[in-house]
Image: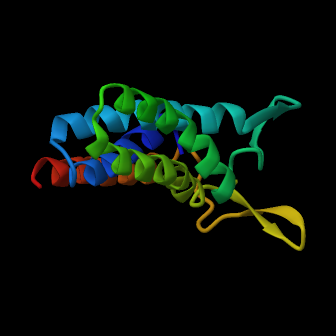
């Protein structure tokens, strides 16, 4: 999926989760502070170029590793929340840090290059649908899902 699609989908998902604990606007800001850097880290560190071809690597495109890389921005937000003594937002921030990486994998598993899973001690690619990463219909559907989650968060 396109990076902008990952941003919108995960911001919508995290805003929906945060909105169960706080206002929509606070939810949206915290979600963006976690989602944008997490998705950027996963994509920038998880792609390498070989012979002019960009491919995914298991460095970030596995479920367990995506959790670890996605949690890095959440740690920075947690430090800020502890500093301003906003203790009630610590649990949703931890949840958001855990969820943002797998939400990236959820979208990538539908692309032609998929994600990596470990089988018999070796990394293998796994894909459910084999869509191109820039397929406008699939990206649009994921963006629509993120926008729907934002709308639901606004109306909680």
Q: Residue at x 51, y 30 (%)?
A: 37
Question: Residue reaching furthest bottom?
Answer: 120
- Picture coordinates of residue 120 (x, y %)? 89, 74
- Picture coordinates of residue 143 (x, y %)? 35, 46
- Picture coordinates of residue 80 (x, y %)? 39, 27
> On the picture, is 51 further left or further right than 87?
right
Q: Residue at x 9, y 52 (%)?
A: 155
Q: Is residue 142 visible?
A: yes
Q: Residue at x 59, y 66 (%)?
A: 129
Q: Is residue 140 visible?
A: no
User: In this orientation, which residue lies closer to the viewer: 57 or 53?
Assistant: 57
Q: In the rendered picture of this protein, how many numbered marks are placed on residues?
A: 0
> On the picture, is 49 further left or further right than 11?
right
Question: Residue reaching furthest left?
Answer: 155
Relative vertical location of residue 56 with respect to residue 145 in this rendering, above or below = above
User: In this orientation, which residue lies closer to the viewer: 156 or 146?
Assistant: 156
- Picture coordinates of residue 65 (x, y %)? 68, 51
> On the picture, is 100 further left or further right than 68?
left
* Quadrant of image for the N terminus: top right
Q: Residue at x 26, y 37 (%)?
A: 28
- The picture quadrant where one finds residue 64 is bottom right
Colour theme? rainbow
* Quadrant of image for the C terminus: bottom left
């Amino acid at each position: 999926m396109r990076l902008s699609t990952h941003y919108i989908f995960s911001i919508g998902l995290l805003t929906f989760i945060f909105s169960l604990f706080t206002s929509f606007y606070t939810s949206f800001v915290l979600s963006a502070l976690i989602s944008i850097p997490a998705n950027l880290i996963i994509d920038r560190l998880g792609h390498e170029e070989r012979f002019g071809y960009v491919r995914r690597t298991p460095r970030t495109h596995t479920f367990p590793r995506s959790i670890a890389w996605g949690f890095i921005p959440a740690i920075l937000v947690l430090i800020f929340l502890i500093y301003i003594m906003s203790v009630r937002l610590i649990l949703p921030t931890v949840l958001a840090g855990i969820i943002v990486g797998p939400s990236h994998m959820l979208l990538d598993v539908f692309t032609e290059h998929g994600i990596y899973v470990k089988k018999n001690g070796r990394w293998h690619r796994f894909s459910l649908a084999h869509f191109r990463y820039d397929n406008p219909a699939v990206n649009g559907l994921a963006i629509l899902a993120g926008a729907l989650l934002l709308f639901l968060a606004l109306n909680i």
